[in-house]
Amino acid sequence: MTTEPRIIILEHIPTDAELFELQLRKGNLPCSTKRVSSKEQFLRVIQEHTPDLVIADISMPRLDPLTAMELANEVTPGVPWILISPPAGEELISECFRRGAADFVSKKMYPRIVTAVRRALERKESPKQTAATEPQKPEEESIPLLSSALESMVDLIAIVDLEGRRLYNSPSYKLLLEDPEELRGTDSFMDIHPEDRDMVRRAFHDVVRTGNGKHLGYRLMGIDGEVRFIESKSNILKDEAGKPTGVVIVSRDVTSHRRADESLLGLIASTARSNDEFFPGLVRHLAGHLGVRFALASECIDATRDRVRVLAYWADGRPVPSFEYDVAGTTCEQVVKSGKLCYFPANVQELFPREKALVAMRASCYLGVPLLNEAQTPIGHLFVMDDKPLADPQHAVTILNIFAGRAGEELEKKNSNRFG
């Protein structure tokens, strides 16, 4: 008589564990389940009753899956694990995968738990029979069934054989290269930038030779012809006998971060010297770095701070000649008069109906900071404006505050008048 498989459910949320059990019942998969929610419970249960399978929530607050897998291997080695994954945690998933997890199921795809459990139990019961009846194919047998979890990830997940041929690419690859199905079986080095290709190839074969994972940065040629900057982490895959069968590579497109860093360096370089190009360079690079249409630097004309003169203005990709304007009733009034940072994330046209220029500019958001003299009195201001919300308001505030200090010093040097 065949006994029902014993399954431990490592889950701190009782309703989630009940959902797993319900799916197993609906899938006509008879089994005996036991939920545990702590390290102590887990150790006691696996010592009293050797499980046939463990289902573990990867987001357990006091017992991470790597630790749990190590504890289980000391007591009951060889028990397959299925990890329940939120739509995040790619590096942790990759490491669990490397340590032998049988499968991953996204929390958004509960029904797939039945297929994952059934397959894991079948592979556990007949590994010798499978090996004896047909040769193992790395591209079919040694790759855990990760597609449901990987499809919810933004990062680029690839599984390649020991020669670097693609066995699996996550759907996110379609944004950079082409349909993942079209990539299957192709050389994974072919899309690497020619100047980086040999370096990446050597690093890959070093991973295969030593079994040690690597972090690597390189350039990739996108399907649109654009160069993309990639950061990758690779880990070796092994079969049950410990023999390498492939490599899993978790990559991230860091092009936007790289270009932002380059933009910031340009902004720093443009303000490094004290000359007539300081303010024009500041607003030009500020607009480019923050991705906004407008950036302006001004100086107060007199001690009342009712009117300002534009030192430099960058609008829609071009410099605009200097002009003067009254600040009363404008987005800039509080910045100049009170010396306060002002941020209006949206609807500036409705908030400042007297400022007719906002309509022509199609302005939506505004961020302004004062330029202060040594006595911390406003002597001008710096602002950015756009027709859409700022992509990263906190970063924009930080950048404006940093360069406002430098601009205040430069303006104080430039002018002989001090406003008290």
Image (spheres, rainbow, N blue to C red):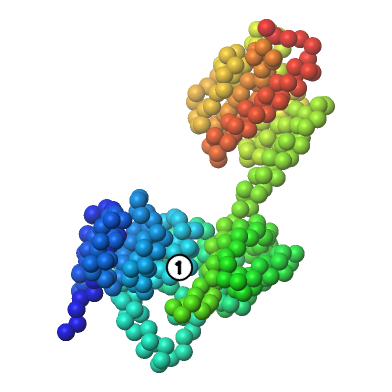
Q: Could one spot residue 23 in this view of the protein?
A: no
Residue with the most extreme bottom position: 133
Residue 40: x percent and y percent? 28, 56
Q: Horizontal placement of 384 versus 10: left or right?
A: right
Q: Eyeballing the image, is 63 above or below 34? A: above
Residue with the most extreme left position: 1
Residue 309: x percent and y percent? 72, 18
| Residue in the image at 27% along x and 53% along y | 13
Residue 162 found in image quarter = bottom right
Q: Horizontal placement of 131 versus 161: left or right?
A: left
Quarter of the N terminus within the rendering: bottom left
Q: Eyeballing the image, is 411 above or below 141? A: above
Q: Looking at numbered disc 1 in the image, what kind of residue is underneath it?
A: Arg
Q: Horizontal placement of 261 versus 342: left or right?
A: right
Q: Nearer the viewer, residue 297 or 153?
A: 153
Q: Eyeballing the image, is 324 above or below 127? A: above
Q: Which residue is mark 1?
A: 99
Number of labelled discs? Answer: 1
Q: Which element carries disc 1, helix, strand or loop?
A: loop
Residue 102: x percent and y percent? 39, 71
Q: Residues within 10 Å of mark 1 (few under 14, many from 20)?
A: some
Q: Eyeballing the image, is 382 above or below 18? A: above
Q: Could one spot residue 344 in this view of the protein?
A: yes
Residue 397 found in image quarter = top right
| Residue in the image at 49% along x and 77% along y | 242
Quarter of the C terminus within the rendering: top right
Residue 73: x percent and y percent? 37, 68
| Residue in the image at 54% along x and 67% along y | 235
| Residue in the image at 51% along x and 72% along y | 237
Residue 113 found in image quarter = bottom left
